[in-house]
Image (spheres, grey):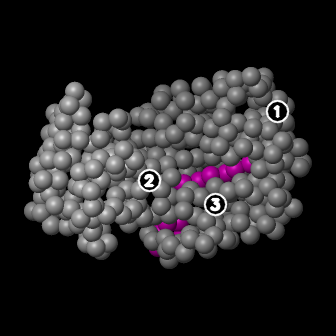
Amino acid sequence: MTDRYSEYRKVAYDLGVDAVALVPGPNFTRLFNASFHSHERPLLVIVPVDGLPAAIVPNLELRSFDLLNFEGEVFDWRDQVGYAGAFETLASKMSLSSLAVEGQVMRVFVHHALKAAYPDLSIVDAEKEISILRMIKSADDLAKMEHAIKISENALTDVLAQVQIGMTEKHVEGLLTQAMFTHGAEELAFGPIVAAGDNSARPHAHARLDYKIQDGDALLFDFGARYKGFCADITRTVFVGSVSDAARDVYETVLRANLRGHEITKAGVTAHEIDDEVTKVLEASPYTDRIRTKTGHGLGRDVHEAPYIVRGNHQVLNTGVVYTNEPGLYKIGAFGVRIEDDVVVTENGCRSLTTFPKELMVVG
């Protein structure tokens, strides 16, 4: 019988620890094909190098947890009593001196509960080793991502046909959100960014309720639907009413950088090499003072995951890795431009999962 925990057992073995702990999040969902919320009630699964796993589960989640066909012992607890006893019972049944955890996912109070139950426990951050397991996307993974992307692109098409001078960013954000659900999004991959004028120069801007879009404004959309657990992450920058020659030149510079990212990508290239080549295009322009971000990041069950496309990261990208190619230029107080595609690495190049046009577009 196939051991569904084998990858995690190997992570523990390679790190020289007794077990790996998983908490609700993308790795948990990948393993069990089910998701649980992270809230004030700790839920975790311990996968040892050898033997059956164990779990701590809030009593109110037991019936849902039963659907996982979990092979090991489950220690439940109720709100009225608290979770400390469940951790103590786990410690009496499973001896641990060292444990690898998801450093970017596991919360501090769960760490403290483990240390209270196992005072001498050595806890190791294995975020990198665990997240690498999700880097190579299967054909099924890619199909779900492409569907999420198609939903997102259809939504953007609908919204751009409605944008008018005088609308607020919040109004447009509402249209975009509604359109994604209309086209089949199960969730939003993240809170969308809709930013016009000077707000577009803030890479992680929030839509404003009181700003009305003006003629000549850059209007930046960074958004994505989630479908069957997988995310889309797309950015397009358009101009409303008209576009100046200066803004057009900035846009064309970013587009050349984006296209260079596609050109350099193939199996065996490093994250460093991609970012270096893309950034060189921006650095060769008159707009070097507007470079504020790296080229991109991995994409899958999380919006941001390994690999991170940045100079200094010499991680090799193999066939099946998906990353975002999203160069941008941002002038604070003026405007910003970002163009983002979701790209899958292939043996001899890459394929853009994103198909929405990138030529400069004037709407409204």
What kind of residue is marked 1? Gly
Q: Quadrant of residue 66?
A: top left
Magenta residue check for 260: no
Q: Which mark is residue 241?
A: 1
The residue nearer to you, when weighing 111 against 154, is: 111
Image quarter of the C terminus: top right
Q: Position of residue 72 (x, y in %)?
A: 12, 52
Tell me if mark 2 has few (under 14), some (14-19) or many (20+) residues whose alpha carbon lies within 10 angstroms of its own.
Answer: few
Stretch of the chain drawn in magenta: 337-353
What distance separates the C-alpha of mark 1 from that of mark 3?
A: 29 Å
Q: Quadrant of residue 264?
A: bottom right
Image quarter of the N terminus: bottom left
Q: Position of residue 207 (x, y in %)?
A: 67, 31
Q: Vertical placement of 75 versus 162: above or below?
A: below
Q: Position of residue 7 (x, y in %)?
A: 26, 65
Badge nearest the viewer, 2 or 3: 2
Badge nearest the viewer, 1 or 3: 3
